[in-house]
Image (tube, rainbow, N blue to C red):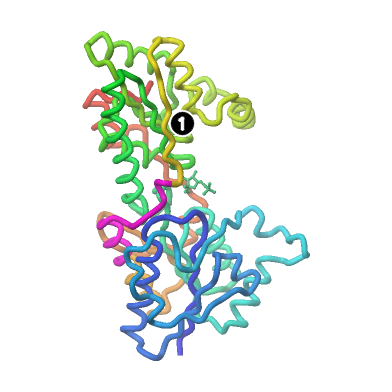
Amino acid sequence: MKRVGILTSGGDCQGLNATIRAVAKTLYNQLGNDVEIIGIIDGYRGLIYGETRKMKPENFSGILTMGGTILGTSRQPFKLMRVVDENSVDKVEAMKKNYKKLGLDCLVVLGGNGTQKTANLLREEGLNVVSLPKTIDNDLWGTDKTFGFQSAVDIATNVIDCIHSTATSHGRVFIIEVMGHKVGWLTLYAGIAGGADIILIPEIPYDINSVVKTIKSRTAGGKNFSILAVAEGAISKEIAALPKKQRKAAVAEMKYPSISYQIAHDIEEATGQETRVTVPGHFQRGGSPDAYDRVISTRFGVKAAELIINKDYGKMVALVNNKVVAVPLKDIAGKLKSVPKDSEVVETARKMGISFGE
Ligand code: F6P
Protein backbone atom coordinates (compact mmCIF):
# COMPACT_ATOMS: atom_id res chain seq x y z
CA MET A 1 0.00 0.00 0.00
CA LYS A 2 1.37 3.40 -1.05
CA ARG A 3 0.44 6.34 1.17
CA VAL A 4 0.69 9.69 -0.56
CA GLY A 5 0.29 13.04 1.20
CA ILE A 6 -0.74 16.02 -0.91
CA LEU A 7 -0.81 19.72 -0.11
CA THR A 8 -1.23 23.06 -1.83
CA SER A 9 0.82 25.96 -0.52
CA GLY A 10 1.20 29.72 -1.08
CA GLY A 11 -1.20 31.96 -3.01
CA ASP A 12 -3.94 30.02 -4.77
CA CYS A 13 -4.43 30.07 -8.52
CA GLN A 14 -6.45 28.44 -11.24
CA GLY A 15 -5.59 24.83 -11.98
CA LEU A 16 -4.81 23.67 -8.43
CA ASN A 17 -7.82 21.35 -8.30
CA ALA A 18 -7.28 20.19 -11.89
CA THR A 19 -3.73 19.21 -10.94
CA ILE A 20 -4.72 17.49 -7.68
CA ARG A 21 -7.38 15.58 -9.63
CA ALA A 22 -4.90 14.43 -12.26
CA VAL A 23 -2.43 13.16 -9.62
CA ALA A 24 -5.18 11.30 -7.74
CA LYS A 25 -7.00 9.83 -10.75
CA THR A 26 -3.76 8.56 -12.26
CA LEU A 27 -2.70 6.97 -8.96
CA TYR A 28 -6.10 5.29 -8.51
CA ASN A 29 -6.11 4.14 -12.13
CA GLN A 30 -2.62 2.70 -11.98
CA LEU A 31 -2.55 1.35 -8.41
CA GLY A 32 -6.22 0.61 -7.69
CA ASN A 33 -6.73 -0.19 -4.01
CA ASP A 34 -3.02 -0.12 -3.45
CA VAL A 35 -2.91 3.61 -2.83
CA GLU A 36 -4.21 5.85 -0.10
CA ILE A 37 -4.20 9.63 -0.46
CA ILE A 38 -4.00 11.88 2.56
CA GLY A 39 -5.06 15.50 2.03
CA ILE A 40 -2.97 17.90 4.10
CA ILE A 41 -5.01 20.94 5.05
CA ASP A 42 -3.88 24.53 4.39
CA GLY A 43 -0.46 23.75 2.97
CA TYR A 44 2.61 23.19 5.11
CA ARG A 45 0.63 24.44 8.11
CA GLY A 46 -1.38 21.19 8.04
CA LEU A 47 1.81 19.15 7.96
CA ILE A 48 3.32 21.13 10.83
CA TYR A 49 0.26 20.93 13.06
CA GLY A 50 -1.05 17.56 11.89
CA GLU A 51 -4.27 18.67 10.16
CA THR A 52 -5.11 16.09 7.56
CA ARG A 53 -8.01 14.41 5.85
CA LYS A 54 -8.24 10.89 4.44
CA MET A 55 -9.32 11.34 0.83
CA LYS A 56 -11.59 9.09 -1.16
CA PRO A 57 -11.75 8.76 -4.96
CA GLU A 58 -15.05 10.68 -5.04
CA ASN A 59 -13.33 13.71 -3.45
CA PHE A 60 -11.47 14.19 -6.72
CA SER A 61 -14.55 14.12 -8.94
CA GLY A 62 -16.17 17.26 -10.30
CA ILE A 63 -13.25 19.52 -9.39
CA LEU A 64 -11.57 19.98 -12.78
CA THR A 65 -13.15 23.37 -13.40
CA MET A 66 -13.19 24.60 -9.81
CA GLY A 67 -11.03 27.57 -8.84
CA GLY A 68 -9.07 27.69 -5.58
CA THR A 69 -8.04 24.49 -3.84
CA ILE A 70 -10.15 21.84 -2.14
CA LEU A 71 -7.29 21.33 0.34
CA GLY A 72 -6.99 24.95 1.44
CA THR A 73 -3.74 26.85 1.41
CA SER A 74 -1.62 29.20 3.51
CA ARG A 75 1.61 31.11 3.23
CA GLN A 76 4.40 29.67 5.39
CA PRO A 77 7.38 31.89 4.58
CA PHE A 78 10.54 29.90 3.94
CA LYS A 79 12.62 32.28 6.04
CA LEU A 80 10.49 31.39 9.08
CA MET A 81 10.67 27.62 8.56
CA ARG A 82 13.73 27.31 10.78
CA VAL A 83 12.28 29.70 13.36
CA VAL A 84 10.31 28.07 16.19
CA ASP A 85 6.72 29.31 16.53
CA GLU A 86 5.12 31.03 19.57
CA ASN A 87 4.55 27.60 21.16
CA SER A 88 8.19 26.60 20.61
CA VAL A 89 7.24 24.22 17.79
CA ASP A 90 10.20 23.41 15.55
CA LYS A 91 8.36 23.42 12.22
CA VAL A 92 10.77 21.30 10.21
CA GLU A 93 10.99 18.66 12.94
CA ALA A 94 7.19 18.72 13.29
CA MET A 95 6.75 18.13 9.55
CA LYS A 96 9.18 15.21 9.62
CA LYS A 97 7.41 13.75 12.64
CA ASN A 98 3.95 14.04 11.08
CA TYR A 99 5.18 12.62 7.77
CA LYS A 100 6.37 9.54 9.69
CA LYS A 101 3.25 9.39 11.87
CA LEU A 102 1.04 9.41 8.77
CA GLY A 103 3.15 6.59 7.33
CA LEU A 104 3.69 8.51 4.10
CA ASP A 105 5.74 7.08 1.26
CA CYS A 106 5.85 10.46 -0.34
CA LEU A 107 4.67 14.04 -0.16
CA VAL A 108 3.26 15.88 -3.18
CA VAL A 109 3.40 19.68 -3.01
CA LEU A 110 1.83 22.17 -5.36
CA GLY A 111 3.31 25.62 -5.05
CA GLY A 112 5.40 28.56 -6.14
CA ASN A 113 8.89 29.71 -5.24
CA GLY A 114 8.67 29.60 -1.45
CA THR A 115 6.92 26.22 -1.59
CA GLN A 116 9.66 24.76 -3.80
CA LYS A 117 12.31 26.00 -1.38
CA THR A 118 10.59 24.27 1.54
CA ALA A 119 10.07 21.15 -0.61
CA ASN A 120 13.81 21.08 -1.24
CA LEU A 121 14.51 21.57 2.46
CA LEU A 122 12.28 18.59 3.29
CA ARG A 123 14.08 16.59 0.60
CA GLU A 124 17.38 17.45 2.25
CA GLU A 125 15.87 16.30 5.53
CA GLY A 126 15.21 12.88 4.00
CA LEU A 127 11.55 13.10 2.96
CA ASN A 128 10.39 11.79 -0.42
CA VAL A 129 9.01 14.80 -2.24
CA VAL A 130 7.45 15.40 -5.66
CA SER A 131 6.47 18.97 -6.50
CA LEU A 132 4.40 20.76 -9.11
CA PRO A 133 4.87 24.30 -10.47
CA LYS A 134 1.98 26.55 -9.50
CA THR A 135 1.72 30.32 -9.83
CA ILE A 136 0.14 33.06 -11.87
CA ASP A 137 3.55 34.78 -11.79
CA ASN A 138 5.29 32.19 -14.02
CA ASP A 139 8.52 32.91 -12.14
CA LEU A 140 9.63 29.35 -11.34
CA TRP A 141 13.06 28.39 -12.54
CA GLY A 142 13.29 25.15 -14.54
CA THR A 143 9.89 25.29 -16.24
CA ASP A 144 8.78 27.30 -19.26
CA LYS A 145 5.27 27.61 -17.85
CA THR A 146 3.52 27.24 -14.52
CA PHE A 147 -0.13 26.29 -14.25
CA GLY A 148 -2.34 29.26 -13.37
CA PHE A 149 -0.34 31.67 -15.49
CA GLN A 150 -2.37 31.41 -18.69
CA SER A 151 -5.73 31.79 -16.91
CA ALA A 152 -4.45 34.91 -15.17
CA VAL A 153 -3.19 36.25 -18.51
CA ASP A 154 -6.71 35.73 -19.91
CA ILE A 155 -8.31 37.63 -17.04
CA ALA A 156 -5.84 40.54 -17.13
CA THR A 157 -6.26 40.69 -20.92
CA ASN A 158 -10.02 40.85 -20.54
CA VAL A 159 -9.61 43.76 -18.10
CA ILE A 160 -7.45 45.63 -20.60
CA ASP A 161 -10.01 44.91 -23.35
CA CYS A 162 -12.81 46.35 -21.22
CA ILE A 163 -10.76 49.38 -20.25
CA HIS A 164 -10.06 50.15 -23.91
CA SER A 165 -13.64 51.16 -24.66
CA THR A 166 -13.99 53.45 -21.66
CA ALA A 167 -10.51 54.94 -22.27
CA THR A 168 -11.36 55.80 -25.89
CA SER A 169 -14.80 57.18 -24.99
CA HIS A 170 -13.38 59.52 -22.36
CA GLY A 171 -10.04 60.25 -24.01
CA ARG A 172 -8.18 59.18 -20.89
CA VAL A 173 -4.94 57.55 -19.98
CA PHE A 174 -5.55 54.27 -18.17
CA ILE A 175 -3.15 52.22 -16.10
CA ILE A 176 -4.03 48.59 -15.48
CA GLU A 177 -1.95 47.29 -12.59
CA VAL A 178 -1.16 43.62 -13.13
CA MET A 179 0.00 41.13 -10.48
CA GLY A 180 3.23 39.17 -10.84
CA HIS A 181 5.15 39.89 -7.65
CA LYS A 182 8.78 40.65 -8.60
CA VAL A 183 8.53 39.70 -12.27
CA GLY A 184 6.76 40.94 -15.38
CA TRP A 185 5.58 37.81 -17.20
CA LEU A 186 1.89 38.37 -16.55
CA THR A 187 2.05 42.05 -17.47
CA LEU A 188 4.08 41.37 -20.61
CA TYR A 189 1.71 38.70 -21.94
CA ALA A 190 -1.51 40.48 -20.95
CA GLY A 191 -0.10 43.77 -22.22
CA ILE A 192 0.62 42.34 -25.65
CA ALA A 193 -2.66 40.37 -25.78
CA GLY A 194 -4.64 43.43 -24.70
CA GLY A 195 -2.92 45.82 -27.10
CA ALA A 196 -1.35 48.03 -24.44
CA ASP A 197 0.62 51.03 -25.69
CA ILE A 198 3.09 51.00 -22.84
CA ILE A 199 4.21 48.00 -20.75
CA LEU A 200 6.18 48.57 -17.55
CA ILE A 201 7.81 45.56 -15.90
CA PRO A 202 10.34 45.22 -13.06
CA GLU A 203 12.99 43.76 -15.35
CA ILE A 204 13.09 46.97 -17.45
CA PRO A 205 13.14 50.01 -15.14
CA TYR A 206 11.17 52.88 -16.64
CA ASP A 207 11.94 56.55 -17.13
CA ILE A 208 8.81 58.60 -16.49
CA ASN A 209 9.94 61.18 -19.10
CA SER A 210 9.99 58.45 -21.71
CA VAL A 211 6.48 57.31 -20.65
CA VAL A 212 5.20 60.89 -20.89
CA LYS A 213 6.89 61.36 -24.28
CA THR A 214 5.11 58.29 -25.67
CA ILE A 215 1.72 59.52 -24.43
CA LYS A 216 2.29 63.02 -25.82
CA SER A 217 3.32 61.69 -29.20
CA ARG A 218 0.22 59.49 -29.29
CA THR A 219 -1.92 62.56 -28.52
CA ALA A 220 -0.10 64.55 -31.20
CA GLY A 221 -0.81 61.72 -33.64
CA GLY A 222 -4.56 61.93 -32.95
CA LYS A 223 -4.88 59.16 -30.36
CA ASN A 224 -6.84 60.63 -27.49
CA PHE A 225 -6.23 57.71 -25.13
CA SER A 226 -3.35 55.55 -23.94
CA ILE A 227 -3.30 52.20 -22.19
CA LEU A 228 -0.51 51.20 -19.83
CA ALA A 229 -0.08 47.68 -18.46
CA VAL A 230 1.99 48.19 -15.33
CA ALA A 231 3.38 45.34 -13.23
CA GLU A 232 2.81 45.70 -9.50
CA GLY A 233 6.58 45.37 -9.12
CA ALA A 234 7.48 47.97 -11.79
CA ILE A 235 10.32 50.24 -10.77
CA SER A 236 11.65 53.57 -12.02
CA LYS A 237 15.21 53.97 -13.27
CA GLU A 238 15.91 56.35 -10.40
CA ILE A 239 14.89 53.82 -7.75
CA ALA A 240 16.57 50.93 -9.58
CA ALA A 241 19.85 52.86 -9.45
CA LEU A 242 19.79 52.94 -5.64
CA PRO A 243 21.54 50.30 -3.52
CA LYS A 244 19.16 47.40 -2.72
CA LYS A 245 18.40 48.46 0.87
CA GLN A 246 17.62 52.07 -0.07
CA ARG A 247 15.45 50.84 -2.93
CA LYS A 248 13.07 49.11 -0.51
CA ALA A 249 12.95 52.20 1.68
CA ALA A 250 12.24 54.46 -1.33
CA VAL A 251 9.33 52.26 -2.41
CA ALA A 252 7.99 52.17 1.15
CA GLU A 253 8.15 55.97 1.38
CA MET A 254 5.89 56.41 -1.65
CA LYS A 255 2.74 58.24 -0.61
CA TYR A 256 0.55 56.22 -2.97
CA PRO A 257 -0.93 52.76 -2.34
CA SER A 258 1.09 51.34 -5.24
CA ILE A 259 3.48 52.35 -8.01
CA SER A 260 0.62 52.72 -10.53
CA TYR A 261 -0.85 55.66 -8.63
CA GLN A 262 2.52 57.41 -8.55
CA ILE A 263 2.86 56.91 -12.32
CA ALA A 264 -0.72 58.15 -12.87
CA HIS A 265 0.01 61.27 -10.83
CA ASP A 266 3.21 61.97 -12.79
CA ILE A 267 1.47 61.44 -16.13
CA GLU A 268 -1.46 63.70 -15.27
CA GLU A 269 0.90 66.42 -14.07
CA ALA A 270 3.09 66.25 -17.17
CA THR A 271 0.39 65.82 -19.84
CA GLY A 272 -2.70 67.42 -18.31
CA GLN A 273 -4.62 64.37 -19.49
CA GLU A 274 -7.06 62.64 -17.13
CA THR A 275 -5.44 59.44 -15.88
CA ARG A 276 -7.09 56.55 -14.05
CA VAL A 277 -5.84 53.39 -12.39
CA THR A 278 -7.56 50.01 -12.43
CA VAL A 279 -6.30 47.26 -10.12
CA PRO A 280 -7.87 43.85 -10.82
CA GLY A 281 -5.80 42.36 -7.97
CA HIS A 282 -6.79 38.91 -6.72
CA PHE A 283 -9.47 38.71 -9.40
CA GLN A 284 -6.57 37.53 -11.58
CA ARG A 285 -6.15 34.41 -9.43
CA GLY A 286 -9.78 33.47 -9.16
CA GLY A 287 -12.32 31.38 -10.99
CA SER A 288 -12.09 28.48 -13.34
CA PRO A 289 -8.84 27.49 -15.10
CA ASP A 290 -8.91 28.11 -18.84
CA ALA A 291 -8.57 25.24 -21.31
CA TYR A 292 -4.79 25.62 -21.55
CA ASP A 293 -4.38 25.38 -17.78
CA ARG A 294 -6.74 22.41 -17.57
CA VAL A 295 -4.58 20.56 -20.08
CA ILE A 296 -1.21 21.55 -18.60
CA SER A 297 -2.44 20.78 -15.07
CA THR A 298 -3.56 17.35 -16.23
CA ARG A 299 -0.24 16.69 -17.96
CA PHE A 300 1.68 17.84 -14.89
CA GLY A 301 -0.46 15.78 -12.52
CA VAL A 302 -0.09 12.60 -14.55
CA LYS A 303 3.70 13.06 -14.63
CA ALA A 304 3.76 13.58 -10.85
CA ALA A 305 1.84 10.32 -10.36
CA GLU A 306 4.33 8.52 -12.60
CA LEU A 307 7.23 9.84 -10.51
CA ILE A 308 5.49 8.58 -7.37
CA ILE A 309 4.85 5.15 -8.87
CA ASN A 310 8.49 4.92 -10.02
CA LYS A 311 9.78 6.22 -6.66
CA ASP A 312 11.56 8.96 -8.57
CA TYR A 313 11.59 11.54 -5.80
CA GLY A 314 13.20 14.93 -5.19
CA LYS A 315 11.90 16.34 -8.47
CA MET A 316 9.63 19.13 -9.68
CA VAL A 317 7.45 18.45 -12.71
CA ALA A 318 8.18 21.01 -15.43
CA LEU A 319 7.43 22.01 -19.00
CA VAL A 320 10.54 22.33 -21.15
CA ASN A 321 10.21 22.95 -24.89
CA ASN A 322 6.60 21.79 -24.67
CA LYS A 323 7.59 18.44 -23.12
CA VAL A 324 6.59 17.51 -19.58
CA VAL A 325 9.74 16.51 -17.71
CA ALA A 326 11.03 16.26 -14.14
CA VAL A 327 13.81 18.54 -12.89
CA PRO A 328 15.80 18.02 -9.66
CA LEU A 329 14.48 20.21 -6.85
CA LYS A 330 18.01 21.02 -5.79
CA ASP A 331 18.66 22.66 -9.18
CA ILE A 332 15.62 24.93 -9.22
CA ALA A 333 14.75 25.78 -5.62
CA GLY A 334 15.41 29.41 -4.69
CA LYS A 335 15.98 30.61 -8.25
CA LEU A 336 13.74 33.27 -9.72
CA LYS A 337 12.88 33.21 -13.43
CA SER A 338 12.50 36.80 -14.55
CA VAL A 339 11.74 38.11 -18.03
CA PRO A 340 14.97 38.39 -20.03
CA LYS A 341 15.20 42.04 -21.16
CA ASP A 342 15.92 41.12 -24.73
CA SER A 343 13.78 38.00 -25.00
CA GLU A 344 11.98 37.32 -28.23
CA VAL A 345 8.63 38.31 -26.72
CA VAL A 346 9.99 41.64 -25.47
CA GLU A 347 11.59 42.28 -28.86
CA THR A 348 8.30 41.44 -30.57
CA ALA A 349 6.56 44.07 -28.49
CA ARG A 350 9.29 46.64 -29.18
CA LYS A 351 9.04 46.02 -32.92
CA MET A 352 5.29 46.63 -32.68
CA GLY A 353 6.03 50.05 -31.23
CA ILE A 354 5.02 49.14 -27.67
CA SER A 355 7.06 51.25 -25.27
CA PHE A 356 8.75 49.82 -22.18
CA GLY A 357 9.40 53.34 -20.91
CA GLU A 358 13.15 52.97 -21.46
O1 F6P B 1 2.32 34.91 -6.19
C1 F6P B 1 1.02 35.15 -6.60
C2 F6P B 1 0.59 36.54 -6.18
O2 F6P B 1 -0.74 36.72 -6.62
C3 F6P B 1 1.47 37.66 -6.68
O3 F6P B 1 1.25 37.99 -8.02
C4 F6P B 1 1.12 38.75 -5.71
O4 F6P B 1 2.17 39.68 -5.58
C5 F6P B 1 0.90 38.00 -4.43
O5 F6P B 1 0.61 36.66 -4.79
C6 F6P B 1 -0.20 38.53 -3.57
O6 F6P B 1 -0.17 37.86 -2.36
P1 F6P B 1 -1.37 37.74 -1.31
O7 F6P B 1 -2.34 36.75 -1.84
O8 F6P B 1 -0.69 37.25 -0.07
O9 F6P B 1 -1.97 39.10 -1.20
Instruction: Give the side of residue 124 with respect to residue 292, left or right.
Output: right
Instruction: Give the side of residue 93 with respect to residue 166, left or right.
Output: right
Few, some or many residues within 10 Å of mark 1 (<14, 14–19, 20+): many
Q: Which residue lies at the image location 58% right of the left edge and 63% below the top edge?
A: 121
Q: What residue range appears in magenta?
A: 283-299
Q: Which residue lies at the image location 27% right of the left edge and 26% below the top edge?
A: 350
Label 1's element? loop
Indicate the position of residue 338 as horizontal and vertical percent values: 42, 41
Indicate the position of residue 287 as horizontal and vertical percent values: 37, 55
Front-lying residue, 35 or 63: 63
Indicate the position of residue 180 as horizontal and vertical percent values: 44, 42
- Amino acid type at image mark 1: Ala
Indicate the quadrant containing the N terminus: top left, top right, bottom left or bottom right. Answer: bottom left
Name the magenta segment's main secondary structure.
helix
Indicate the position of residue 4 as horizontal and vertical percent values: 47, 79
Q: Which residue lies at the image location 39% right of the left edge and 16% below the top edge?
A: 274
Let me know if residue 39 is in the magenta part: no
Where is mark 1, residue-wise? 234
Relative to residue 222, is residue 264 depicted above or below? Answer: below
Relative to residue 286, is residue 251 depicted above or below? Answer: above
The image quadrant that residue 188 belongs to is top left
Relative to residue 54, is residue 265 depicted above or below? Answer: above
